[in-house]
Image (cartoon, helix red, strand yellow):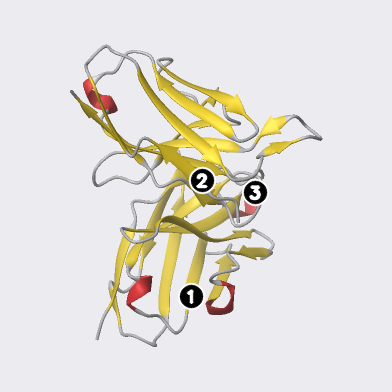
Amino acid sequence: QVQLQESGPGLVKPSETLSLTCTVSGYSISSGYYWGWIRQSPRKGLEWIGSIYQSGSTSYNPSLKSRVTMSVDTSKNQFSLEMNSVTAADTAVYYCARMGTSMVIYNWGQGALVTVSS
Amino acid sequence: DIVMTQSPDSLAVSLDERATINCKSSQSVLYSSNNKNYLAWYQQKPGQPPKLLINWASTRESGVPDRFSGSGSGTDFTLTISSLQAEDVAIYYCQQYRSTPYTFGQGTKLEIK
């Protein structure tokens, strides 16, 4: 059974870079599927950030594209999110997820709360 | 972007009664080449991530009780719980995956009356 676990700093200063890693267990990232990041905040609800394939091919939400980079490390069975120039509006629970080729979200991590504050 | 609008925002239903949640998309999520609606329903309980209940508008995920059903096509969709159980208290979200950016409804909070 696939499990996903987010890790990274829970507090980031404004204008700095948010970095999160998702460690996947029970399934090899190299075997297929897309891998994505979704965030949830009281202000904006659930928001898809982007998705990445095992090959490294990415698709990002246009509203965040200029600030987001996703990468995959198949040797560690991990994928990562970086978001630069963060503001308080980026405070949210960040979920990593396994997504089908259709982009439906099959599995979610437990979520990581990231607060942007000085 | 495709805007997803759910109604109502909250709903209180008695145990064993039917609960109905609606979701409307600002553009059709039906893909004509395969006649599939790119619409999913998720359930989120407090302190937990969302859980996929239904995809392709009406296909239940494995292990999801058959009291949950999805219907609709094009721009109008419905999630029905035929006989509400206590464990169904949650927030329910619809999501379109027809086109990027993939977008969610604002959620419907379901409670026991």
Q: Is residue B28 left or right of residue B53?
A: right
Circle 2: residue type: Met
Tell me the distance, in whole angstroms, between the alpha carbons under discs 1 and 2.
27 Å
Q: Residue at x 48, y 51 (%)?
A: A97
Q: Is residue B86 left or right of residue A95?
A: left
- Badge 2 sits on which subunit? B
Give the SS element for disc 3: loop
Give the SS element for disc 2: strand
Residue B64 visible, this orientation: no
Provide the residue designation for mark 2.
Answer: B4
In the rendered image, the quadrant that contains the N terminus of chain B is: bottom right
Give the SS element for disc 1: strand
Q: Residue at x 56, y 67 (%)?
A: A73
Residue B103 vs B40, above or below: the answer is: below
Q: What is the quadrant of residue A1 in the picture?
A: top left
Residue A63 visible, this orientation: yes
Q: Residue at x 61, y 36 (%)?
A: B75
Provide the residue designation for mark 1.
Answer: A82
- Foreground mark, 1 or 3, reads 1
Label 1 in the same subunit as label 2: no
- Badge 1 sits on which subunit? A
Q: Nearer the viewer, residue B55 or A106?
A: B55
Circle 1: residue type: Glu
Q: Residue furthest left?
A: B113
> Which mark, residue A32?
3
Residue B40 vs A12, above or below: the answer is: above
Tell me the distance, in whole angstroms, between the alpha carbons under discs 1 and 3.
22 Å
